[in-house]
Image (cartoon, rainbow, N blue to C red):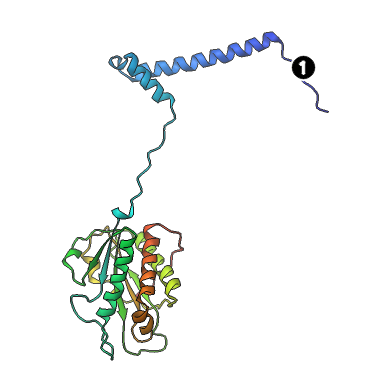
Amino acid sequence: MTALKPPIPTRRKKELRTGQVLQTTITVAILVATLFTAFSPSLFSNANFNAMLAQFMSPQQAAIAPVPTPEQIRVGIVSGHWGHDSGAVCDNGTTEQQVNLAIATLVQQKLTAYGYQVDLLQEFDPRLNGYKAAVLLSIHNDSCQYINDQATGFKIAAALANRDPNLSSRLVSCIRDRYGRITGLPYHDSVTLDMTQYHAFNEIDPSTTAAIIEAGFLYKDYNILTSHPNVIADGIVAGIQCFINNENIAPQPTVAP
């Protein structure tokens, strides 16, 4: 059994209450003195004083930066070789430019449906000069000729000139993860200087996070690239959204050319 404490004498209770009241009175006095010291006398009409006192006593909330809506986010999609040349040409007459444009158009349509502002750009589009966007991605495809049995899959590289390498690394990581999972294509570890030094990277505004993707090899990956461009586009769109929405993804190592 817990021992009971003796009751506090009535006199002591009164002393405690008196001390608490005195402490509260002193606190309010200090607050009022601080207000009079901090502000000029001309401000102390009854209305001003009451308003300032209420503001001073109320808890203040930290300012929260507004989150951009999709309509405020711009994305640039470059359709490789479009408006310039054919790119790789297959034996059946299919050109890389045609395949790139089919995929890039679907990517634009899908991102637009999500509410983003999307520019579909030609290879040497004059709008690339000083272009500002959250993301710029150039879409290409690799050779139509047989190279070897390992010539399958996709490659992706960031712009070496990106102002923030952490952002460009995250863009590459997002696209590499989402694109690989959705398309089922393997990552091909053969990034070249032509990719990392892609001409558009030197034309756009340095604040634009940019990358280039070789979506597949037109020889071994021909079927999925030409017969299932929606799957290819879905993989690219998911990667871009991963980046824009800051979704959780472990950074992938960047392969030196």
15 versus 164 height, above or below? above
Identity of the residue drawn at 18% across and 64% down: 127
Label 1's element? loop
What count of labels does the image hold? 1
126 versus 13 height, above or below? below
Residue 193 visible, this angle: no
Report which residue position mark 1 lands on: 6
Residue sitting farthest toward the front: 113
In-image side of 24 versus 176 (left or right): right
The N terminus: image quadrant: top right
Choose top left, top right, bottom left or bottom right for residue 17: top right
Q: Residues within 10 Å of mark 1 (few under 14, many from 20)?
A: few
Residue sitting farthest toward the left: 126
Choose top left, top right, bottom left or bottom right for residue 2: top right
Identity of the residue drawn at 63% across and 14% down: 16
**Depth order, front residue of 239/158:** 239
Identity of the residue drawn at 29% across and 79% down: 99
68 versus 84 height, above or below? above
Residue sitting farthest toward the top: 11
188 versus 54 height, above or below? below
The C terminus: image quadrant: bottom left
Residue 228 position in % (x across, y down): 37, 78
Residue 206 position in % (x across, y down): 25, 59
Q: Amino acid at mark 1?
A: Pro
